[in-house]
Image: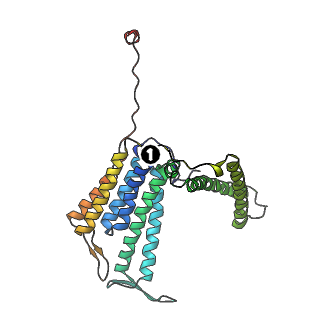
Amino acid sequence: MRSPLAYVPRAGRLQEAAPGAAIAYLGSFVAAAFLLSNPITLLAATAGAALAGLLAGARRAVLASLRIGGVLALLIIVVNGIVTHRGDTVLARLGHWPLLGPVDITGEALAAGAGIGLRAMAAMVAFGVYSACVDPDRVLRLLRPLAARSALTATLVSRMVPLAARDAARLREAAALRGPAASEVGRAAIARRLLAGSLDRAVDVAATLELRGYGSSAPCHDCARQRSRHDRRFYAAAIAVALVVLLARAGGADHYATYPGIRLAAGADTFAVAAALLAAGLAPLGRRHRRMRRPVTVEAARA
């Protein structure tokens, strides 16, 4: 079964864009997630990245990223609430814990953890959309003039990791089909067999690359640039997100403090920033139109 985060070729503006434009566009949401702190703007950045993925056809990747990011955010909130004892609003006193001392759950600690968790979830969604919509081969081709050997290594890694995952699934399925009378196969045995198979495959790939002369090939200095008619759209959206984030930080629209009390900016400027981040997720809107061929008439053929 294919991973929901695996790249799948699709027709769409984000998929057709050059790797640099797609990276700049999705990277702007990651930058917004790390630079912003207000939960309203962080939720808008998450929604913008998710909207971009949905419009690009990566619905499974968006849902998987939201699920993983939600679990991670919940874990961060719980851990921060237990470890951090700052804040005036005490919600629960859990007594004395070993190594931690007296544990008091405060609303401010939970709010601080929620801000960090939302930041992680926004970045997770953006990376999920990137993984499902940006062709890794085109990205590595973009990096080839800069580091040919590193690009080749990354290409092999991007191809071998899915193979190893499929091998592990086959080994688990084969172990389950052995019958109830067979001895149980533990994870250590499957891991040893998977490691042995990966090493054998690595030796075969190394021998094949050596026979094809990859070790002695000169680096490529004249590689064609990858461009698309949609690049300006995504570069403009990335610049717009960067400007909105900088203005929000400079103008106080992103103000959010948790200690000693929770102070949250929720004015019109904050919601304007959120609307701009959400609107940036509409950049992949549109679909690829095919040109219809007109039937050739007899008069046109004679002309």
Front one among 3 and 245: 245
**Going by the image, does 156 lie left or right of 237?**
right
Q: Quarter holding the C terminus?
A: top left
**Going by the image, does 200 lie left or right of 72?**
right
Looking at the picture, the colour scheme in use is: rainbow
Q: Kindly state the secondary structure of the residue where label 1 is placed.
A: helix
Q: Position of residue 281 (x, y in %)?
A: 34, 52
Q: Position of residue 295 (x, y in %)?
A: 41, 18
- The answer to which quarter of the image holds residue 87 is bottom left
Q: Give the residue displayed 46% in from the left and 77% down from the top.
A: 79
**Going by the image, does 85 lie left or right of 60?**
left
Q: Which amino acid lies under the numbered mark 1 shown in the image of this protein? A: Gln
Q: Position of residue 31 (x, y in %)?
A: 37, 62
Instruction: Name the residue beneath numbered marker 1.
Output: 15
- The answer to which quarter of the image holds residue 270 is bottom left
Q: Is residue 257 above or below residue 122?
A: below
Q: Give the residue displayed 28% in from the left and 64% down from the top.
A: 246
